Amino acid sequence: MSSTLDDQTVVVTGSSSGIGRGIAREFASRNANVVVNSRSQERADDAADEIADETGSVVPIEADVTDADSLQSLVDRTVSEFDSLDVWVNNAGINIRGPAEEMSLDDWQRVIDVNLTGSFIGAKLAGKRMIEQGTGGSIINVSSMMGEQGQTGRTPYNTSKGGVNNLTRCLAIEWAEHDIQVNAIAPGYIQTEMVSDARDQIGFDEKDVVDRTPLGRFGTVEEVANCAAFLAEKEHFMTGEILHPDGGWLSFGWGSKS
Ligand SMILES: NC(=O)c1ccc[n+]([C@@H]2O[C@H](COP(=O)([O-])OP(=O)(O)OC[C@H]3O[C@@H](n4cnc5c(N)ncnc54)[C@H](OP(=O)(O)O)[C@@H]3O)[C@@H](O)[C@H]2O)c1
């Protein structure tokens, strides 16, 4: 089946697991050239091997999103491998939980560095390359519905994702003249290692999420990946938009679900 992503070159940061790996697989299934990324070459290799049965080409490249030189090298190696850069997905993310009054500045900074500054560096380098290329492009930031909500014990994470939302809007306006569309996906609860970590570390109860979600379940990696492909295909009039695959969580205020 042909797709508008045929032979487009896509980088997905933090795609060794979870949502990032699912997005990489979705793009590869639509015949794109996909760069899979992790801080570890071994984990990137494993993810690329697992996706290799899809029709697109998949190349694993190690890089740390908090290190601008490392991300520049990711851009350069992508272009040398595939001759272009068309879609960049800022997916890498971490969460460090704890009471705000006990939170160390190192932990605060680590979350901001990966989630917010890492997204800025990735977008800046990808946007520069797309502007030089002159063929437009798509930048997709994986935010979180928690970027629009307060929560106990998640101050750095939720603040970083609020920043990612406004980063998305600012870059969308600035680069519209270059036909670079910048959008975000802000998912609700999706079953990944990040959620299993929360269960293991803080006794997070998955039933509470199911009960609070109007659709009555967790979202899947594939559902988020579909949103990424939709945004990347640019067959819409959206830029600076934040999509919420959250099962209705943000729309639900108070009272019975039914
Ligand atoms: N799961 C959810 O419910 C949910 C909901 C809303 C938003 N999100 C967002 O979705 C994104 C993916 O989360 P996930 O649930 O799929 O988590 P995950 O399975 O823990 O995946 C996180 C990914 O980020 C990578 N990563 C972390 N730090 C990195 C760095 N400095 N440089 C490069 N890569 C780095 C990890 O790769 P390595 O460890 O191999 O380097 C891994 O591939 C995050 O931005 C998260 O905030 C998740």
Image (cartoon, helix red, strand yellow):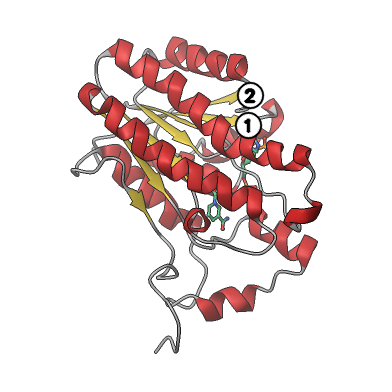
Identify the image quadrant of the C terminus: bottom left
To which residue does mark 2 refer?
62
Give the class, few, some or many, for how many residues have Cα within 10 Å of label 2's Cα (few <14, many ≥20): many
Q: Residue at x 77, y 55 (%)?
A: 101
Q: Residue at x 43, y 13 (%)?
A: 79
Q: Residue at x 19, y 42 (%)?
A: 235
Query: Are dots 2 and 1 in contact, CB under 8 Å?
Result: yes
Q: Indicate the secondary structure of the residue bearing disc 1.
A: helix
Residue 140 locus on image (x, y percent): 40, 38
* 202 horizontally vs 74: left or right: right
Residue 255 locus on image (x, y percent): 45, 87
Give the class, few, some or many, for how many residues have Cα within 10 Å of label 1's Cα (few <14, many ≥20): many
Q: Is residue 128 above or below residue 225?
A: above
Q: Is mark 1 within 8 Å of ligand 1?
A: yes
Q: Is residue 25 above or below residue 82?
A: below
To which residue does mark 1 refer?
44
Quarter residue 93 falls in: top right
The mark closer to the camera, 2 or 1, is: 2
Q: Is residue 82 above or below residue 166?
A: above
Q: Residue at x 56, y 44 (%)?
A: 160
